[in-house]
Amino acid sequence: MSRIRRTDNIRPCAGLQYLKGENMIIKNQIITAGITDITSEGSGVCRADGFAVFVPDTAVGDVAEIRIVKVLKSYAYGIVEKLLTPSPDRTAPECPMYKKCGGCIFQHISYEAECRIKSDIVRNAFQRIGGLSPEYDDFIAADSHSRYRNKAQYPLAVQDGKAVCGFYAKRSHRVVPVSDCRLQPEVFADIVSCSLDYINSHKLSVYDEATHTGILRHIYIRRGYHSGQIMVCFVARKDYSRQLTQLAHILHHEIENVCSVVMNINPDDTNVILGKKWVNLFGEDTITDTMCGNRILISPPSFYQVNTPQAEKVYAKALEYAAPAPDDILADLYCGMGTIGLSMADSVSSLVGVEIIPEAVEDAKQNAAANEIYNAEFHCGDAGKVFAKLRKDGCSPDIIVVDPPRKGCSAETLQVIVNPAPKKIVMISCNPSTAARDCKWLTENGYSLEKVCGADFFPRTAHVECVVLMSRQKS
Ligand code: SAH
């Protein structure tokens, strides 16, 4: 059995517990240790006699007295009792709610250190999960690590008799009221504050998750990074348009660039934020932005990259990796509203996109038309299934770009991608672990992993992206 053994750097303290029948320190033990590593969830790691101890809110280079709070078979959890030597990576968190809110995990270290960690997370995933050693391009850091998001979803709750909204506390569904999240544009705080004033003064009904009663569930805001256009969406359990129309007009008049206010109806007892029904409250149903020089129409349920300047850099990297010839056919699987494929459409002979959300496919078609891109077609449905059908009808792309959700590509999608084998596969992924898993499969099925490039779309949070180039093996 693995356990922490008593050593010179471990000293017992009051309230100490021992394993039954063994003279081994377990819970409440205090060790003095240096943090040597950090996990992909942002927890520091130190070692006590070869035993890994996970210590939240620490940085590599910290030396601390750590109290062991939980011991499992091969690892333990600890908390900092006393920080003896702070790591040079440490910095003061910008957000006063950092400790309470579950959104950020890297506010206590410098952005440079965060990028180092994220770059290592990508490398470790490919090495450990994929057993792969590709060439790595320079990590794509963000120019700005605050106010970078173009979208926010604030859950509403009632606290002390008043409507509040903010973010969920770590590992919980308790709303921590946050008036100004440092990752969101400042104008989002104005919209939230104006909406809450109205909701409270007009005693509008707020949803209670526990009892599935009340009406207003979320305030969901989107802003075009380049255009500045803002859409506000109120998510309600049932039609509340009569009560919200005046607020929609107030938002338009009081806050610059609010040009669309909509309501989404989600009647279900679920964690999923958006329901299927949409009601217009003010202005247009969509906003527009530009991405990689293309005009992009954004409808509320469609996926749109949350960090526009970073997405533009990553799309440029994907284009560099794809390096298409003018007569190449390009497939863009998991294409959302078509932004990646459309950014490459001028460089290829034709483009075919596949996406599961019908509204996103409609956006993709309109985006192609709005940008006078006539060599693109978009299909709705599961990437694997729809692409298999397209294959049967003779579609044989030279380059396939895939940008799947966190769970990665389905086995069916991978099978259909390689048969017949395109020259190149470019993968963009928001989860290096599943990217490494899928790349491993591809290396066993006719592809060489050429290059990987990590990128940060979500500074201060645990998320990290990567772009991958795979090419068909010569033999
Ligand atoms: N490439 C786009 C979207 C990437 S996010 C961009 O850069 O903006 C992943 C996309 O995959 C989302 O739009 C999601 O709706 C879509 N998706 C999820 N599961 C899918 C599936 N099984 N088949 C096709 N698309 C899927």
Image (cartoon, rainbow, N blue to C red):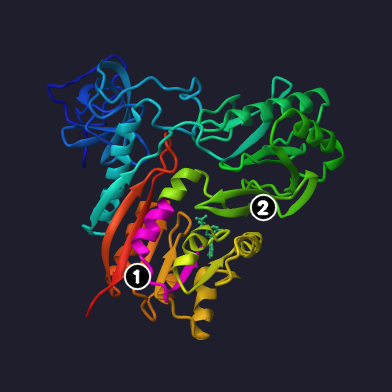
Give coordinates of residue 371: x percent, y percent.
60, 61
The answer to whether residue 235 is seen in the rendering is no
| Residue at 20% over, 29% down | 24
Cβ–Cβ below 8 Å for labels 2 and 1? no
Asked if the stretch drawn in magenta spans residue 333, the answer is yes
- Residue carrying label 1: 424
Q: Is mark 1 within 8 Å of ligand 1?
A: no
Which badge, 2 or 1, is on the more N-terminal residue?
2
Amino acid type at image mark 1: Lys
- The quadrant where residue 40 appears: top left
Picture quarter with the C terminus: bottom left
The answer to whether residue 40 is seen in the rendering is yes
Find the magenta span and give its range: 314-334
Give coordinates of residue 236: x percent, y percent.
75, 42
**Mark 2–mark 1 distance (CA, rounded to whole Å):** 31 Å
Horizontal placement of 34 versus 423: left or right?
left
| Label 1: how many Cα within 10 Å (few below 14, some 14–19, many 20+) | many
Horizontal placement of 441 versus 95: left or right?
left
Toward the viewer: 122 or 190?
Answer: 190
Q: Secondary structure at mark 1?
A: strand
Give coordinates of residue 337: x percent, y percent.
58, 59
Amino acid type at image mark 2: Ser
Picture quarter with the N terminus: top left
- Residue carrying label 2: 299
